[in-house]
Amino acid sequence: MALPPHLELGESESLYQGAADIPRAGPARVLLGRYEGATSAIEAPSPINYLAVKLKAGETWRYEPPAGHTVLWAGIGKGVVEASSELLARGEIVVFEAGEDPVEFKARSDTEFMIGSAVRHPHDLVLGYYSVHTSAEALQIGEAQIDAIRDKLVAKGRL
């Protein structure tokens, strides 16, 4: 996830949650952000939602992005679902047209998918091989930090 400049080179954090600890909003588990009164325990670094959705064949679910969330994407993990008159199958990722319009999902089979929405990132992005940053300098520092972590894990026999 692209982070704002003041966070992008910061220390990482982790939080373990069991399935029962993740809040639900209908068929969606709220992994990050807030949706329909359910709020993730993870503090989001910017306005973003990331939900895990399960639908049975024939079920319909409508996602209404919060105000300002003009970026919307989904990744299908299992089954086939229809969204915006398109059939989406396991392994496919879709980025919807920019806007705040709701999207209706209709499961053609038992399906599981991830959906995310966010406010557009206000910073330029510099893409690396496996990292995204807001400047070339931050990218270089971030990738050097990743290499240093890898070297430590190799030295400890963990990689």
Image (cartoon, grey):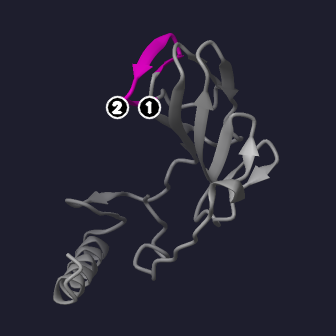
Earlier in the chain: of badge 2 and badge 1, it is: 1
**Image quadrant assignment for residue 146:** bottom left
Task: Identify which amino acid the numbered label 1 is placed on.
Answer: Ile
> Could you tell me residue 83's position as x and y percent?
53, 18
**Quadrant (top left, top right, bottom left, bottom right) of the C terminus:** bottom left
Mark 1 lies on a secondary structure that is strand
Asked whether 106 or 43 is in front, the reply is: 106
Residue 72 in view here: no
Residue extending farthest to the right is 37
Q: Is residue 9 above or below residue 106?
A: below
Which region shows up in magenta? Answer: 80-95
Q: Which residue is mark 1?
A: 76
Q: Which residue is mark 2?
A: 91
> Could you tell me residue 30's position as x and y percent?
66, 49
> Could you tell me residue 2's position as x and y percent?
43, 60
Label 2 Cα neighbours within 10 Å, binned few <14 / some 14-19 / many ≥20: few
Q: Residue at x 45, y 72 (%)?
A: 5
Mark 2 lies on a secondary structure that is loop
Q: Are marks 2 and 1 in contact (CB under 8 Å)?
A: yes
